[in-house]
Image: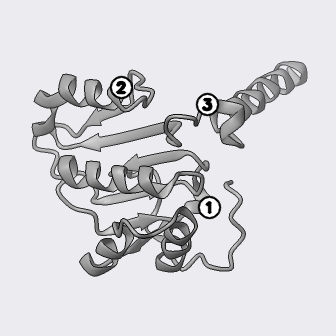
Amino acid sequence: MKKIICGFLTVFLLAGVFWYPVSASASCDTSITTICTIEMWLSHKQKKKKKELRSFLKSKSIKVLRHTIQYWKPRGGHPPTNIAIGGGLSAQDARFVIDLALQYNDNINGLIHQRLNPPNYVAIATSAWDDNSETPITPEQLTALRDAKLTTEEFHRLYRELTKEAGVAQKFY
């Protein structure tokens, strides 16, 4: 029994290593886009745009898996209006994702802490984290994040300031 449990834990731990990339170079080609993984939870009304959205993401060289886009149940309310942007995304890709979230999820009023996610990961409307993992933002703060003049470094510095992560270790765990 002990061998079975140890074997199971070893497989589980190894699977975890491959599930979340430690660095972009180990997990995907970032020469076209710095987005390696994107997950979206959209309202049920968006389901009719499924093919269009999948094609659009693929045209931007973003890998689309079976569960990349998921939909809320009919009459399930509106998905969360938050976004998670990993610290390895370029400012241009981060702004693209913000625009995508606004187009398909209506609003963004919360940011998920960067240190909780892999560097090249994005989530739109995630409910995977608790309230302490999300910081509310104002429309003005969102406008500041969307500023095309921000460099990648400036974008992530602002993101971490808004989430009150400035000075906190940036390692994803």
Q: Between disc 3 and disc 2, whose residue precedes? A: 3
How much space separates mark 1 and mark 3, taking CA atoms?
20 Å
Residue drawn at 43 percent across, 54 percent down: 92
In this view, which residue lies farthest toward the front? Answer: 149
Q: What crowding class fits label 1: few (fewer than 14 Cα within 10 Å), some (14-19), or many (20 or more)? A: many
Q: Between disc 1 and disc 3, whose residue precedes? A: 3
Check the picture and name the quadrant holding the N terminus.
Answer: top right
Q: State the SS at label 1.
A: helix
Query: Residue beneath label 2, please?
Result: 58
In this view, which residue lies farthest toward the right? Answer: 3
Q: How many marks?
A: 3
Q: Which disc, if any, is residue 115? A: 1
Q: Amino acid at mark 2?
A: Lys
Query: Residue beneath label 3, please?
Result: 28
Residue 39 on image: x %, y %: 40, 39
Q: Amino acid at mark 1?
A: Arg
Q: Quadrant of residue 21?
A: top right
